[in-house]
Image (cartoon, rainbow, N blue to C red):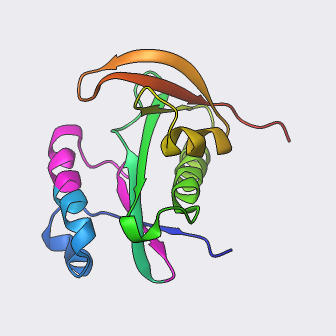
Amino acid sequence: MNMIQLVPIAQTMEENYAFAAYPEGQEILTMTVAYYKTIGFIPPWIGYFASFNGKLAGSGGYKGKPLDNKIEIAYGTFTDFKGQGIGTQICRQLVLLAQSTDPTLLITARTLPDHNHSTRILQKNGFQLLGNVWDKEDGDVWEWLYEPQDI
């Protein structure tokens, strides 16, 4: 199985010229650069495109720097790459990066409050459903917590 590679989204549009050839990524690129103005640009707690076989297949990142020893991840797969395990890999890479940066962090994610593709991705990656929470951007959502697997 080919692995995805996380490619950092830089702080400014000018620095991200290499992504200009990917129309599906333009909205994410614009939103991510704008989001940096709100949350700051603090690597590795930034946004990433997911490269798969030399093509951008999706995106993922962190919703800001850690707060109260918690970090929230978010991810998505582009239309042409859905159903190929890319979202599962993006999620896994974000978890691994967070763990290697600070193994004490609690890693969380939020989904719409129903069983869907995203909830299956989180379950495959060892996340457990904590329950409903109110998100100022998304309203009523489910919150998930990564539970490290015993080795």
Q: Is residue 29 magenta?
A: no
Image-quadrant location for residue 125 = top right
Above/below status of 53 relative to 109: below
Above/below status of 1 relative to 105: below
Residue in the foreground of this view, choosing between 117 and 44: 117
Q: Tell me where residue 19 appears, x and y as whole percent.
A: 26, 76
Q: Is residue 15 visible?
A: yes
Above/below status of 45 relative to 77: above
Q: Specify the segment rendered in magenta.
A: 31-53
Q: Tell me where residue 73 appears, x and y as whole percent.
A: 44, 41
Q: Name which residue lies at 32% across and 48% down.
A: 42
Above/below status of 83 relative to 118: below
* 103 lies left or right of 17: right
Q: Tell me where residue 54 appears, x and y as whole percent.
A: 45, 83
Image-quadrant location for residue 30 = bottom left
Q: Is residue 44 visible?
A: no
Image-quadrant location for residue 10 = bottom left
Q: Name which residue lies at 64% across and 38% down.
A: 123
Q: Tell me where residue 66 appears, x and y as whole percent.
A: 42, 33
